[in-house]
Image (cartoon, helix red, strand yellow):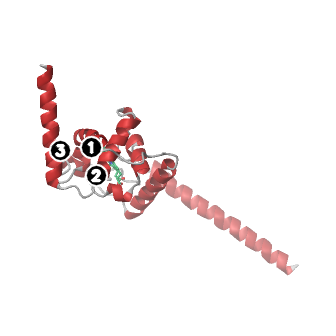
Amino acid sequence: MPKQYGGKHLTIAAMAGGAFVAAAFGAVGFAIVGLGWFDVAASSPHSRLVYWITHTTMVRSVQAQSRSVVAPRRFTAAQAARGFRAYDGECVMCHGGPGVPRAPWVSGITPTPPYLLDAAHEWTPSQLKIIISNGLKMTAMPAWNVRHPDAQTWDIVAFVEQLRGMTPARYAQMRHDLRNRTARAQNGRQ
Ligand code: HEC
């Protein structure tokens, strides 16, 4: 029976190894959660490992959630114009725009909100819709569905799609036109 005897030893060694690994994970988990090992200060960046874990989790989650979201086949210029109004009022301070820097306090956010000039290349419209509607837990990205119904969020997606390749002059022009329109509407009401 030497073979069986050896097999038994292996099983016991594997179980002991498994228990050791579980105990080690438990101890590290306890130290992180219970003893304050994890640095929650937004003033220090994530370690590469934590960044990789959180970023990969975010990307996979957005990919999974967006699978059932059907995007419009194409966006109209009117949709993008409406989206610009929301973007310039609610997003630009954190994400900046062509020729527009982020607000100075944004460098104090971890992870720092990225510029979205290439977002349409990185994300499909359905994925952008999920990110903007639902926000991103454990980051400063809010869920905009508390403010915008679905149709308005698609308008914002339509504008983010246009950010790619948009010149600073074009963004400044859109701002200028928007201010003029708002001023005219206000004058009309007086
Ligand atoms: C208070 C700051 C803040 C505001 C305001 C804000 N965001 Fe964000 N946004 C973030 C942060 C933080 C992230 C996450 C960055 C990360 O995960 O690395 C993010 C991520 C995103 C992403 C994913 C970017 C990427 O490539 O990973 C998109 C798209 C986005 N936001 C769009 C918007 C839009 C559109 C608005 C306005 C309706 C908006 N955000 C308003 C902070 C903000």
Amino acid identity at mark 1: Cys
> Residue at point 36% right, 34% down?
148
Q: Residues within 10 Å of mark 3 (few under 14, many from 20)?
A: some
Residue furthest to the top in view is 190
**Callout 3 secondary element:** helix
Q: Can residue 97 be seen at all in this image of the molecule? A: yes
Q: Is residue 179 left or right of residue 21?
A: left
| Residue picked out by circle 1 | 91
Where 69 falls versus 1 (above or below)? above
- Identify the disc placed on residue 174: 3
Whole-number angstrom distance, CA of label 2 to CA of label 1: 15 Å
- Identify the disc placed on residue 162: 2
Whole-number angstrom distance, CA of label 3 to CA of label 2: 12 Å
Q: Residues within 10 Å of mark 1 (few under 14, many from 20)?
A: some
Where 134 falls versus 64 (above or below)? above
Mark 1: C-beta under 8 Å from nearest atom of ligand 1: yes
Quadrant where the C terminus sits is: top left
Q: Residues within 10 Å of mark 2 (few under 14, many from 20)?
A: some
Between residue 48 and residue 152, name the one nearer to us. 152
> Residue at point 82% right, 75% down?
5
Task: Name the N-terminal-most of marks 3 and 2.
Answer: 2
